[in-house]
Image (cartoon, grey):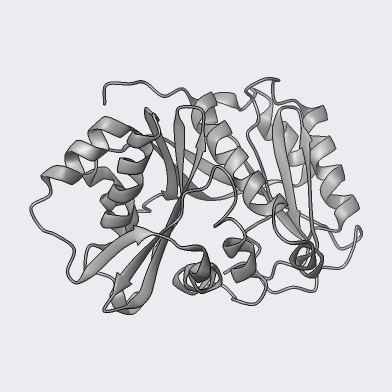
Amino acid sequence: MTTAVQPSVAEQSEAEALYRFQTETPEPVRTALGMSATRIGGGVVLSMRDDITRFWSKALGFGVTEPVTARLVEEVCDFYRAARTPQAAFQIAPAFLPADWPEICAREGIVEESSWAKLVGTTEEAVARADALDVPPDGISVTPLEAQHALEWGTVMMRAFGTPVEHYAEMGAATVTRPGWHPYGAWLHGELVGTGTMFVRGDTAQMFAGAVLPHARGRGGQTALLAARARRARELGCRVLVAETGAEAPGTHNSSLHNMLRLGFEVAYERPNWIWRLTPDEGPDEGPDEH
């Protein structure tokens, strides 16, 4: 890769995309899911109290404009306590974790769980790799999404990720016509089977919500969605692409990770998910465990 991407750029790209994705959701959906958000210490703090997936409550983007300190973490946890958030993830690049991070975690009851891979790439490299692919998608066509397909697109996104559809599909659909977002759909014989969008911030393009329904996988749809967004990013003058996916544990295989590596993305670092949970004496947690 010819352009170095600093952790500060990669982290803020993701944080701003997630902040926009959740805060621009229609108010009825925000109310139904118990959504709230704030900015603390240069990062974003997102709460979805009634999210049964336990995925969307996250605190990220820290360490760029201010250091990560015990006081900052306490302030974030206080926000989650006030919001009655059952569980939230701190997602902080390893380069920004302070020396006393273990002590901070012990004080707030934060534990390390699964890790994500943070991937970065250059637009030119991704487009060149996409143009050089020998095998075209098998029956899959990828096109910019038209507004009339927004709710269907949001529904496919959530189904592909294996999450509930009610309210969540509307959250995804809301981004389709929002400034800064560039959504694409993957089609198989006229059926919308895959989704992918991109949030552009300066010269950085954040890959977001790339997924294909199970019955349409193995046809090159996800790679085609990545390629289409990379080409659009180049048209918009973006130099840098940023993405995240689950890190491969020993003995596992993440197809999404390998699709991105094939297009020239590189793993910049792995970032653990540091999980905070509301304790029984702080409030009830009646939701199911994270899946």
Percent of width and height locating residue 103:
72, 32
The residue located at (71%, 27%) in the rendering is 42
Query: In the figure, 114 relative to 285: above or below?
Result: above
**Residue furthest left as drawn:** 134
- Visible in this render: residue 31? yes
Q: In this rendering, would 260 be left or right of 96?
A: left
Q: In this rendering, would 281 be left or right of 178?
A: right
Percent of width and height locating residue 231:
30, 42
Percent of width and height locating residue 37:
78, 47
Query: In the figure, 108 relative to 254: above or below?
Result: above
Percent of width and height locating residue 229:
36, 47
Q: Nearer the viewer, residue 138 or 277?
A: 138
Q: Quadrant of the N terminus?
A: top left
Q: Quadrant of residue 224?
A: bottom left
Q: Nearer the viewer, residue 183 or 159?
A: 183
Q: In this rendering, would 272 be left or right of 289?
A: left
Q: Count of labels shown? A: 0
The residue located at (49%, 48%) in the rendering is 115
The residue located at (75%, 53%) in the rendering is 47
Q: Quadrant of the C terminus?
A: bottom right
The residue located at (92%, 60%) in the rendering is 281
- Visible in this render: residue 213? no
Q: In this rendering, would 110 be left or right of 197?
A: right
Query: In the figure, 118 relative to 257: above or below?
Result: above
